[in-house]
Image: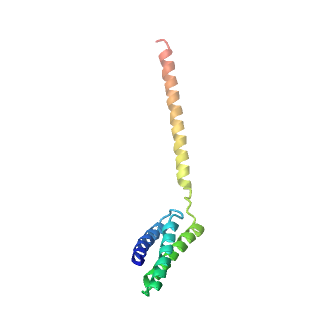
Amino acid sequence: MRRTALIIGFVAVVLALILSLFPLGTIALAPALITLLLGVIALYLSKKADKPAKGPIVLIALSALCVILVLVKETMVDSTVAEDQKFEKREEASEQEAIQELEELEELEELEEEKDSLPE
């Protein structure tokens, strides 16, 4: 049982570390908390069986690191996208040019219609 808890814990802590590096919100807390629970279980089983507790302590430390990393990222890092003012201005200018071209086309069509309606 101890070995199974350690293996699943190490897989979960790797997943938690990977998820905590990406901007996915607090989704990395789930594997980190699972790792913390499995680390405590493995530590208890290690103490009970008089085995070394180095693996469970590493699991607990890594899961605590993941939890801290996720919480700091969520509270301290602002992940909003800044507006690009130059892009906005270019987009507006492009829209104005398109409107102007459409108006010119409409004027040309009106002139052609007038020309066609005049008797020759």
53 in relation to 25, above or below: below
Residue at 50% x, 20% y: name it: 113
Q: How many marks?
A: 0
* Farthest residue, direction top: 119
Q: Nearer the viewer, residue 91 or 59?
A: 59
Chosen colour scheme: rainbow
* Farthest residue, direction right: 75
Q: Nearer the viewer, residue 43 or 84?
A: 43
Picture coordinates of residue 70 (x, y %)? 53, 69
Residue at 56% x, 56% y: name it: 83
Horizontally, residue 1 falls left or right of residue 29, namely left
* Farthest residue, direction front: 48
Picture coordinates of residue 13 (x, y %)? 45, 72
Q: Quadrant of the N terminus?
A: bottom left
Picture coordinates of residue 112 (x, y %)? 48, 22
Residue at 49% x, 25% y: name it: 109
Residue at 49% x, 81% y: name it: 44
Picture coordinates of residue 102 (x, y %)? 51, 33
Q: Nearer the viewer, residue 108 or 28?
A: 28
